Amino acid sequence: MAANDGAIRFQALPPEEAIAYFKAKGYNLAESWDWRDFWQAQHATSFTVAKSAGFDVLKDIQAAVDDAISRGLTLKQFSAQLTPILQQKGWWGKKELPDPLTGEVREVQLGSPRRLRIIYDTNMRMSQAAGEWARVQRTKRSAPYLLYSAILDGVTRPLHRAWNGTILPVDHAWWKTHFPPNGWRCRCSTIQLSAFDLEALGYQVSADPEDDLVMYTNDRTGETQMIPRGIDPGFAYNPGEAALDGHAARALMGKLVDASPDMAAAQAASARFVVPALKRDLAEWIAPRLDALEAGTPIKTGERRVVGALPDEVLEFFTTGRATAGGQAVELASGAVTLSEEGIAHLYREAKRGSGVGLARETIERAVDALWEPEAIYWDKNSPALLYLVDAGEAKGKLVVRVNYAAKVKVPAESGKVRRAAVTTNDLWSGRIIDPADLENAGMYERIK
């Protein structure tokens, strides 16, 4: 809701996509000295605060912003929660400190009510923008247009006022740089429209906006680039698009190696925001391996990728102690679902047995989609495994995910070489055509979702 003082009152809980966006980049904390040290899209995959370098405060600030976004806290609540922590750690007021880049000692502003407002405001707006972009991408088939909407009052930037009412296709290049917010405390937003909306409201798609670029030099890095006039330096990018491109499965896999079970589950869950990028990335990985197998070429590089995350219903199933296999309680070790090249080969061999129960290649290639959108999920009471009921064309199929599977993954070593590290994950291993009624055997399976 807009306010007369130019502020935005964040009262409603943000959507899941906005929360997941912030959580995802929060796993990469990066201390910095100047806001220009991290540029544009880098902020989509890392959380940083200027002047945090040398102080043990970044994790505290990230946790407070996370809480504010997740629970819809006001600026007043956010500040009241964080201020005493920062004051106790000495990150408050003005201090003379050396610039790590130049060595120059100068007076700088650390924590203050104004800085907390900027931190709160910018992270709220960017997270909501990224969440909005994720929803736009998910629904663009039925609503393929975006309308730029500016709040027209006495503090509106002139060019933002001029952009008000601009209507362009969702995938138009203009949104790569002009998807709001487009500056510090920018209050602009977008409205998604369908073809029916355009006709009903009498709107027309706008002509392509003219490129009006100005040169900007980043004094911290020395880099010079052209940015659109009317957009503050550092804001000429689409945070949602940058996040979708940046948070791929491989990055998440690296985080799983050394994470605790609870953290691994949370990190895997953060992939929910980047499902579109995850699907693209994995489709490009799976298809050539199936091609190789069909040509009789073995695939033995030992690569493993994150392909999904266990949904909340499954996590609750384990935390409430309902998961037992062979009469023994099973505790969940990770929230990630992974697929190895060995698993791809096993799925392929099952399909080639000629018995008619193997999954078709198309279904194997869509295994990632099925994990994120299953028709149902069951627990195997005899062995620690989850069974995903999926659409397999003209029939139904099941994908078997082995729970708490001990795997080896390749990770960079300090020497610069690659080492194999042990990781416990949930392994997508097999699949076949089934009769869904077979899964309703209460003695063998329990429906979770």
Image: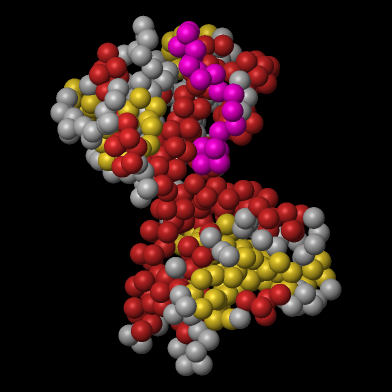
Would you place residue 272 above or below residue 233 in this image?
below
Residue at image location 55% in from the left, 23% down from the top? 10
Is 46 displayed left or right of 423 in the figure? left
Q: Horizontal and vertical percent for residue 2?
A: 48, 16
Quadrant assignment for the C terminus: bottom right
Q: Nearer the viewer, residue 320 or 249?
A: 320
Please state which of residues 195 and 105 is positioned toward the viewer in this rendering.
Answer: 195
Residue most extreme to the right: 327
Q: Is residue 36 visible?
A: no
Residue range highlighted in magenta: 1-19
- Asked if residue 82 shows in the view, the reply is yes
Q: Is residue 316 magenta?
A: no
Residue 411, position in %: x, y? Answer: 49, 59
Q: Nearer the viewer, residue 65 or 431?
A: 431
**What's the image's color scheme?**
secondary structure
Q: Main secondary structure of the magenta part?
A: loop
What residue is shown at x 67% (from left), y 80% (from top)?
438
Location of residue 301 (image quadrant):
bottom left
Relative to 63, 140 lies left or right:
left
Q: Is residue 74 above or below residue 323?
A: above
Closest to the observer: 386 or 438?
438
